[in-house]
Image (tube, rainbow, N blue to C red):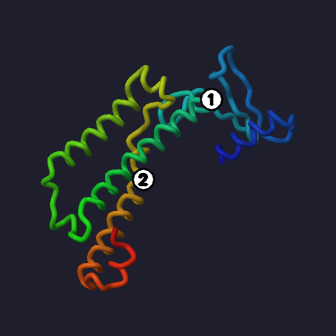
Amino acid sequence: EILFGLSDAFEADANNDNDKPVIVRTGARCDEATMIYDNKSYDLKKCNICNSVCHDPTEALAHAQCAYFVCIIVVQWADILACKTRTLSIYHQGMRNRVLNFGLVFETVLGIFLCYTPGLNTGLGTRGIEFVHWLPALPFAIYILCYDEIRKSIMRQQGESGWVYTYTYY
């Protein structure tokens, strides 16, 4: 309810509508604001996720960019594991490749460094995010891995003359 009210408040402010919610500045700074919606007052000083001023569009964009960047990292984990072998299952192949393991860890540490280092994240347009915002890409990563493992299993069963091998083997 508060999100719809917040979007209506910004639209009301732009269209000069009186029947929609209104954001009222309660102080001299732009981060001191209250939204009045259905005769209820909502404090917009701090974001309930990161305790930052997220109603500021540039801050919200920076959080979203960081979350998107992190999701790309998470899905790349699945991509590299899926492309590790052409027909052999990751279960049978294992994770013995030290260079690959180092690359996965390095990519993750670099992403953490770029997102959470003060100064760098300001220059790159990102902000630190909660751990829960690292998780939205996990279902996609799991899907990629499961799809590829099923594809490899079918290719092993059908052999080189099978349809799956012919049209999905790279």
Q: Position of residue 156 (x, y in %)?
A: 24, 79
Identify the residue at image location x=29%, y=36%: 109
Residue 152 placement: quadrant: bottom left
Q: Quadrant of residue 56?
A: top right
Report the residue marked by disc 2. 137
Say left or right for 79 vs 104: right
Local SS, label 1: loop
Q: Which mark is residue 76?
A: none
| Residue under label 1 | 56
Of tags 2 and 1, the one toward the viewer is 2
Q: Is residue 38 left or right of residue 84?
A: right
Q: Residue at x 74, y 26 (%)?
A: 24
Q: Label 2 is placed on what type of residue?
A: Ala
Q: In this rendered view, identify the residue nearer to me: 138 or 40.
A: 138
Query: Between 68 and 17, which is closer to the camera in this rendering?
Result: 68
Question: What residue do we see at 68% from left, 17% from top?
Answer: 27
Q: Position of residue 71 (x, y in %)?
A: 42, 47
